[in-house]
């Protein structure tokens, strides 16, 4: 494929999405991004790597761009420690570029925002955790962290009657840490600024100490409410690097697991959204339904959250005729229960008063700032990887995308209800079409330096994975990307003009990942 004068070669991706890759120079980096943006494309991910090879520049920065024809991957080798800024074209690049600097010391040229993002006080500012010579020892900078004060320059809003409300990073619940700095007048929010990255786990560094078999277990634990999406994206990336296609039955079973993950998360969110709006009955009912799904997961697939089931080369589970019958019966039960519960949500005046118009992201803003996943579809962004670039078996299931244009909490609730209904249809279709055959294959060896891409539509949005292999199946570099990178900035906009007590409701309607954002 050609973009301007630059020829992109086919990229190794084990799925239906066409992908192309090319090594670019600094001028081409900006030119390709500009053409993508002008054509309605968007930034999928941006990351960097420390290659430590004598024959080429040590560092490189990479960007994955969605264009009309598919996915474009650019790699820019860096002779210096700077590269052209993309945040002027794609605002979502801002935090990704700041993370690249925190982890590898590579800075975008003339960025709009140079504040640290992931570093906090965990390591010195002149030390970079993704460098090859960084000690993979969590205690290496314990003394520095203990003595350092993390002075983050929040943006202040000043004026008569303006107050700041700091919330977090420690919250009144079993959730991960995140700080939210509200500037308010009365109860109305004038500005919200987020600070994440409080539990940087060193996931990308840890992958560099693993081979592809070991990496599968870690991939499924990056953001554990999306373990299927991450495990499938990881397996897809490894299979791409090995030029391998898993057995058809394994791909159909992966889709079955992915839809069950989607159903469970949407059920849980609908319960919490009802509770946040004062309807504890909703929490009780949807929690009960989610628990039934998780228990059946454990009974059939060995784990409530479906961990360690998807591996490169296929899956480690299968379903019998009796288990298929139990899955079908559950679909019937859930459909019947939803037929009772959805009218309650739709007609409850208290819920609708809290939902309608709250936390609105208009379609124009969603498009400009790159909102994706279920939140994007609730704001008129008709994008679902299962529909636009369907891999097996979605290419035979005709996925019906759920979209809405109002972009408020009510729209995000509607999309969840409709996606559960569609997932139940897909589960039945998967069980009807499940082919016979093996569920696991032995992967061929990949050449050193081989790379691959994984791209899967998880319940929250698309999960992207890029891998480069070293000798004997070792992982040289792996970058996982969660859709929350795109969507966290939109939450700051969604809350503007709303009252402070509505923030938990708006936040839950997005339900973004802290863990997937803080690697």
Image (spheres, helix red, strand yellow):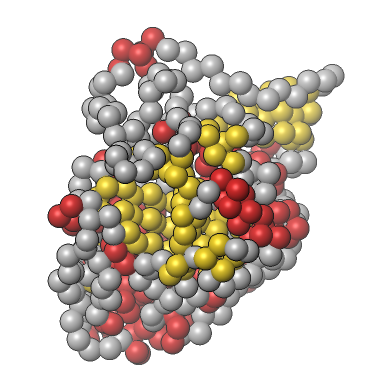
Residue depicted at 45% across the width and 37% down the height: 79
User: Where in the figure is residue 105, as x and y percent of width and height?
Assistant: 45, 30
Residue 498 to residue 128: above or below: below
Residue depicted at 39% across the width and 56% down the height: 465
Q: Is residue 306 visible?
A: no
Residue 210 to residue 143: above or below: below
User: Where in the figure is residue 362, as x and y percent of width and height?
Assistant: 75, 56
Residue depicted at 28% across the width and 76% down the height: 245
Residue depicted at 59% across the width and 41% down the height: 84
Q: Does 346 sit left or right of 268 as displayed?
A: right
Q: Does 185 sit left or right of 471 as displayed?
A: right
Residue 15 falls in image quadrant: bottom left
User: Where in the figure is residue 425, as x and y percent of width and height?
Assistant: 46, 82
User: Where in the figure is residue 192, as x and y percent of width and height?
Assistant: 67, 34
Q: Nearer the viewer, residue 217 or 288?
A: 217
Q: Is residue 200 visible?
A: yes
Residue 269 to residue 207: above or below: below
Q: Does 301 sit left or right of 393 as displayed?
A: left
Residue 391 to residue 196: above or below: below
**Residue that extends furthest to the right in the rendered view of this protein:** 160
Q: Nearer the viewer, residue 199 or 279?
A: 199
């Amino acid at each position: 494929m050609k973009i301007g004068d630059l020829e992109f070669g086919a990229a190794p991706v084990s799925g239906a999405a066409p992908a192309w890759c090319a090594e670019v120079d600094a001028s081409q980096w900006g030119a390709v991004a500009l053409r993508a943006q002008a054509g309605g494309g968007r930034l999928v991910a941006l990351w960097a790597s420390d290659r430590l090879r004598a024959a080429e520049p040590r560092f490189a920065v990479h960007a994955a761009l969605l264009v009309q024809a598919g996915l474009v991957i650019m790699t820019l080798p860096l002779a210096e420690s700077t590269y052209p800024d993309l945040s002027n074209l794609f605002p979502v690049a801002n935090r990704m570029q700041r993370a690249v600097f925190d982890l590898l010391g590579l800075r975008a040229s003339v960025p709009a925002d140079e504040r640290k993002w992931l570093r906090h006080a965990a390591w010195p500012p002149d030390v970079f955790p993704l460098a090859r010579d960084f000690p993979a020892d969590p205690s290496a900078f314990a003394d520095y962290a203990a003595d350092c004060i993390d002075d983050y320059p929040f943006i202040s809003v000043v004026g008569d009657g303006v107050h700041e409300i700091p919330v977090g990073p420690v919250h009144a619940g079993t959730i991960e840490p995140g700080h939210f700095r509200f500037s308010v007048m009365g109860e109305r929010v004038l500005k919200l600024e987020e600070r994440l990255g409080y539990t940087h786990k060193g996931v990308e560094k840890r992958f560099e100490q693993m081979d592809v078999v070991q990496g599968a277990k870690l991939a499924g634990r990056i953001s554990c409410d999306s373990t299927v999406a991450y495990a499938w994206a990881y397996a897809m990336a490894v299979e791409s690097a090995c030029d391998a296609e898993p057995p058809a039955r394994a791909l159909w079973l992966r889709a079955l697991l992915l839809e069950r993950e989607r159903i469970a998360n949407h059920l849980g969110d609908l319960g919490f959204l009802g509770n946040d709006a004062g309807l504890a009955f909703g929490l009780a009912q949807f929690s009960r339904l989610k628990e039934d799904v998780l228990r059946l997961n454990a009974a059939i697939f060995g784990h409530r959250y479906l961990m360690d089931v998807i591996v490169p080369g296929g899956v480690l589970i299968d379903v019998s005729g009796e288990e298929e019958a139990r899955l079908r019966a559950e679909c019937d039960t859930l459909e019947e229960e939803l037929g009772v519960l959805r009218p309650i949500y739709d007609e409850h005046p208290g819920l609708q008063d809290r939902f309608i118009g709250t936390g609105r992201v208009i379609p124009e803003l969603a498009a400009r700032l790159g909102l994706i996943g279920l939140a994007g579809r609730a704001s008129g962004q008709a994008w679902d990887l299962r529909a636009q670039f369907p891999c097996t078996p979605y290419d035979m299931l005709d996925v019906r995308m759920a979209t809405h244009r109002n972009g408020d909490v009510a729209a995000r609730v509607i999309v969840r209800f409709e996606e559960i209904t569609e997932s139940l249809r897909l589960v039945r279709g998967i069980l009807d079409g499940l082919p016979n055959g093996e569920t696991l294959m032995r992967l061929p060896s990949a050449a050193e330096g081989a790379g691959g891409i994984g791209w899967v539509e998880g319940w929250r949005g698309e999960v992207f994975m890029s891998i480069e292999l070293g000798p004997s199946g070792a992982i040289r570099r792996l970058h996982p990307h969660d859709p929350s990178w795109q969507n966290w900035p939109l939450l700051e906009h969604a809350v503007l003009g709303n009252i402070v007590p509505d923030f938990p409701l708006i936040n839950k309607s997005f339900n973004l990942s802290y863990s997937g954002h803080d690697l």
